Amino acid sequence: MAKDENEKIVVGLDIGTTKICCVIGEVNDSGGINIIGIGNSVSRGLKRGIVVDIEPTAEAIKKAVEEAARMAGVEEIGPVFAGIAGSHVKGINTEALVAITGKSREVTTGDVERVIEAVKNQSVPERELIHIISQEFVLDEQDEIRAPVGMRGQRLRAKVHVVTASKARTRDIETSIEKAGYSVDEIVLQPYASSESVLTYDEKELGVCLIDIGGGTTDVIVFTDGGVRHTAVISIGGMQVTNDLAIALKAPIETAEDIKKTFGSAFASTVNEMEEVRVKLIGDRPDRIVPKRIIAEIIQPRMEEIFELVSQELKMSGTEGKIASGVVVTGGAALIPGIEEVVEKVLKLPVRVGYPQGIGGLVETANSPIYSTAVGLALYGAKAKSSGKSGLRLSTQGGLDNFFSKVKRWFVEFF
């Protein structure tokens, strides 16, 4: 592939608890992407979104990226946009205030940089700054301003959502990627990446809760008025459902996973009582015939627990009554039949399953909630490529130069 063509390539790397997924896209003229390669591998070195064994994680990353690269016909892989999740990731709403210093009292990009730097200075030393996401600006007494540059005033206040993570855990992700033979452009919060691929502009404006159910964690992000208001990581995911089935049915984990995917339902009352499934048991025990209704009755309580925890997050964050467009569920567990009925029962909100949108190329292959995060990471990277700010990597070592690189990326995204 020619050098100028290679510069249009963007790589999204979803490092999950149960799978590693790599999506390679080519940035098109509109700033979107055409998917040209997809690779998957079984994840062996993570637990609940956190790297617990670097070597097998690196091997799985290498396998997934190589598979995607072969499909895409790409010989050289540049820096990747990698997702991060886990209980160590924290999101908070905060704000900072600066005085407008110019004689004309006109807000400049320098003023915005200063107010965002003031936000950055509030961060805890052992925490890695992942995102500073704009909610609104307040200029003197005027609020709900999205782009203050060029406006006049005396005091500029920025209200933002800040996402941080453990520096050590972030470095573990980077080390795994580096051991696989690749480098990192930027670490991105996984539900924020998923929002790039599955949410619409109107949903973000009206208010929406995105629930991304992965293997080890359930990631939550809430938008209102176009801005991020809350993020959370719940340490329960699809793997817990599989474990419940394995224990209750006395079946191997692999068998339980297949049953969940093939015969599972998250809402027992919709399952035909007469349908049955043959289950292979652990060891040399003879196979067992199990009604599908029983399988659903094992799955449903765990799914209800996940959405009850989401409900608690909405209440705690004060966003419960502000998500007029409802809930979007994505991730592998979103494919379990009955998921929408369970969400409506617990959260009492309209719901839809989120599929990747706004992509070209291998659409049929990528058209699954399983790929929402990886596609979202590639779309996030495409924005950076289109803005000319690619390669401005947020280092785990921090530093003012790296911070202002992040601020420049932030400007592109919100102005």
Image (cartoon, helix red, strand yellow):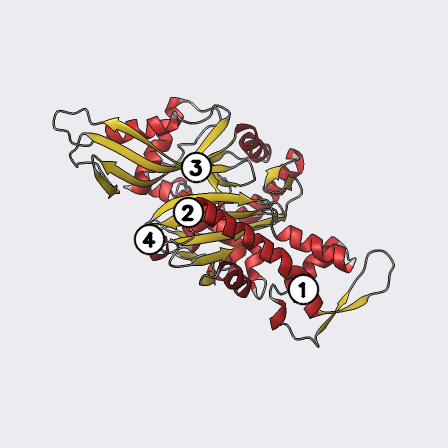
Q: How far apart are the alpha carbons under marks 3 and 1?
A: 36 Å
Earlier in the chain: of badge 4 and badge 1, it is 4
* Quadrant of residue 234 within the rendered picture: top right
Which mark is drawn over residue 92?
3
**Residue that mark 1 sits on:** 297
Q: Nearer the viewer, residue 409 or 274?
A: 274
Q: How far apart are the alpha carbons under marks 3 and 2?
A: 13 Å
Q: Is residue 148 left or right of residue 175?
A: left
x and y percentages locating residue 406 in the rendered image: 37, 32
Please name which of the two marks, 3 or 2, marks the residue nearer to the observer.
Answer: 2
Tag 3: residue type?
Answer: Ile
Say few, some or many: other residues with alpha carbon within 10 Å of mark 1 (under 14 / 14 to 19 / 20 or more).
some
Please name which of the two marks, 4 or 1, marks the residue nearer to the observer.
Answer: 1
Residue at image location 17% in from the left, 33% down from the top: 153
Earlier in the chain: of badge 4 and badge 2, it is 4
In the picture shown, does residue 398 fall above or below 245? Answer: above
**Residue that mark 2 sits on:** 318
For label 4, the SS is helix
Q: Residue furthest bottom?
A: 274
Tag 4: residue type?
Answer: Glu
Earlier in the chain: of badge 3 and badge 4, it is 3
**Do callouts 3 and 4 mark residues in contact (Cβ within 8 Å)?**
no
Say few, some or many: other residues with alpha carbon within 10 Å of mark 4 (under 14 / 14 to 19 / 20 or more).
some
Which mark is drawn over residue 205?
4
> Can residue 115 be spotted in the picture?
yes
